[in-house]
Amino acid sequence: MIELTVNGATHRVDVDPATPLLYVLRNELGLNGAKFGCGMGQCGACTVLVDNRPVFSCLYPVSSTAGRSVRTVEGLGTPARPGPLQQAFIDTQAVQCGYCIAGMIVRAQALLEKVAHPTENQIRAHMSPNLCRCGTHMRILEAIRKVASSGVLHAATNEENRS
């Protein structure tokens, strides 16, 4: 049995410790936001946060989550109450097919929690591991800039850290 904490909830799963986190999230926990893209950590569709750092969950063994906090796109908001980045992606129409978007949002979340007002170069460098085959990169960048300029995400994160 492996115990892991995902989006603030503790789960016990009976899987091989070498099982990629992506498969546990999707098949055992029913969290389907992270997608299987390439299976080689080269596209970013499977990006989740482990201790607030973006990781490719298709390569990350579930055993490595012991004592760590995992966050998925489902932990950033709900359909009824999207998180700031999720809402910005909606507002800027950054989604075309939607396959990469969960990974994009999660990676952007990590950046904006760390850097309140990133430069354009910081945003582009941070987002570069994640690919969008539909070509909505400009709208994705626009959504990230929108949230960064509002400061709402960083302010909420700072408030959580004070609690």
Image (cartoon, helix red, strand yellow):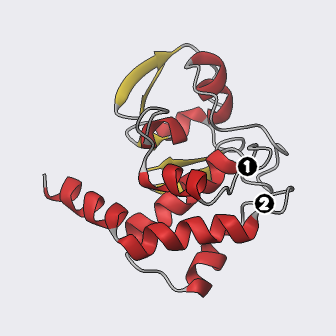
Residue 46, picture quadrant: top right
Is residue 128 in view? no
Q: Using residue 117 as the reference point, say whether residue 36 is left or right of it.
A: right
Label 2 neighbourhood size at 10 Å, few (<14), some (14-19), many (20+)?
some
**For this rendering, which residue is in front, 4 or 99?**
99
Vertical side of 81 occupied by 95: above or below: below
Q: Using residue 35 as the reference point, say whether residue 162 is left or right of it.
A: left
**For this rendering, which residue is in front, 134 or 8?**
134
Residue type at tag 2: Leu
Mark 2–mark 1 distance (CA, rounded to whole Å): 7 Å
Q: Residue at x 74, y 44 (%)?
A: 98
**For this rendering, which residue is in front, 7 or 142?**
142
Q: Residue at x 40, y 70 (%)?
A: 114
> Which residue is most to the left?
163
Vertical side of 139 occupied by 104: above or below: above
- Residue 100 numbered mark, or none: 1
Vertical side of 12 occupied by 133: above or below: below
- In the rendered image, residue 120, in percent from the top left (x then y), is placed at 58, 85
Q: Residue at x 42, y 76 (%)?
A: 149
- In the rendered image, residue 99, in percent from the top left (x then y), is placed at 76, 43
Mark 2 — residue?
131
Q: Residue at x 57, y 65 (%)?
A: 143
Q: Disc 2, disc 1: CB below 8 Å?
A: yes
